[in-house]
Amino acid sequence: MYTNDGNKGKVDFFQSFIEKLNQFRLEKEDRKKPNDEIKKVIEHSHRILAQDHIRDYLDNQ
Amino acid sequence: MKTYLVGGAIRDRLLGFQPKERDWVVVGSSPQEMKSQGFRQVGKDFPVFIHPQTGEEYALARTERKSGHGYSGFEFDTNSNVTLEQDLERRDLTINAIAEDEHGTLIDPFDGQKDIENKKLRHVSDAFSEDPLRVLRLARFKVRFDDFEIVPETLDKVSEIIESSELDHLTGERVWLEMYKSDNPWLFRKELTHLGADNVLYIDSKKSDGIRLSPNMSNKLHMISCFIHEEVSNIDEFCLKLKIPNEYKDLANLLNQSKASIEEYEPDTDSYEQLIDIVKKLDIRKKIDLKISLKCTPTMEIRVRLTFFNHS
């Protein structure tokens, strides 16, 4: 699954996903929301990031 | 009564390091006199006193006599006639057996300064081989002062301890404490292996390859948990034997699970929740700082700091 170089592909896959997560920042207006709503925004954003990340990966196979 | 600064504080200062703490030895005094001056007595095995203002530890000068097995098999004599030199003689290594009086004069009857200068780890006296814990301490100091050499005579003393089976009498707690105090558990184990004493760690080694979750080495919890995760086959049994706190055991087990999850994971369009779940689990305490990299292929090593959910 992770191309010819086995775990190297997996490390790259996780590394770039983690970088995307670490770069994610809440929008100014979202920061003013109550905590439970902020949590929902973050969860939703992470889901989108994960879906896009997987799609990019599969498109490049 | 006279007090002397002693041990690690002198050693570290001579080596150019900032001492972490200061220990004092008191000559010509008694528990009653110490308490009358406001010191608070602690320690069941021998009298140690806490200074009422500084909180630093003051121990009465003492001699030791082997009376049983293991680290605790000693009788102590703290009578007021015990001299500073006698107290220094019972210590483990010459670099730890230097004292300083109130005028800043060093008292160094076992040439500790010379051994610091020549980078030698050398036992103070034949009594070294009476205490099995000293093998672990020696390994720890070798990790800390990696450019120091253990002199052959001291290696002979280590062999005496190993042959006497005294290491078998060390409690799990003492072994754990020395591992905890070591700057790097991987190197600590390596030094114990060099000394022929790695059995004391009770590690049932496992083969570790593939993806590596490497820790932030400045965080003891992460570093030691990662060591356990990488090196130990049966984590629960190991932690039980050494009486390692549950937070280390739990994190080591979590790292095992996470490594397996990462290795088993195969991306497809429906696997995004699984991907998030794997990453979230690694951030279980919201402060974990690990790196994912490949073991066995250092040239390909890729490191990523995981610092999630810190977006506000």
Image: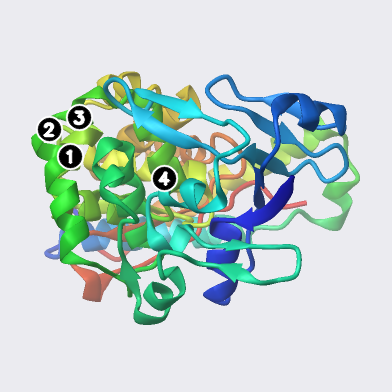
Q: In the rendered view, does B264 fall on the left or right side of B73?
A: left
Tag 1 residue: B161
The label on residue B166 is: 3
User: Disc 1 marks which amino acid?
Assistant: Ile
Asked if the residue under mark 3 is in contact with the one under mark 1, i.e. CB atoms within 8 Å, the reply is yes
Kindly indicate whether the residue at mark 2 contacts the one at mark 1 (C-beta within 8 angstroms): yes
Q: Chain of mark 3?
A: B
- Distance CA(mark 4)–CA(mark 1): 16 Å
- Report whether B299 appears left or right of B24: left
Q: Quadrant location of the N terminus of chain B?
A: top right
- For disc 4, the marked residue is B90
* Image mark 2: chain: B
Residue placed most toward the observer, B134 or B215: B134
Decide: few, some or many residues near mark 1? Use Cα within 10 Å; few <14, some 14-19, many ≥20. Answer: many
Q: Are marks 3 and 2 on the same chain?
A: yes
Measure the C-alpha gap from mark 2 to mark 4: 20 Å
| Pointer 4 or 1: first along the chain | 4
Whether residue A40 sits left or right of residue B157 in the image: it is: right
Q: Amino acid at mark 3?
A: Glu
Q: Label 1 lies in what chain?
A: B
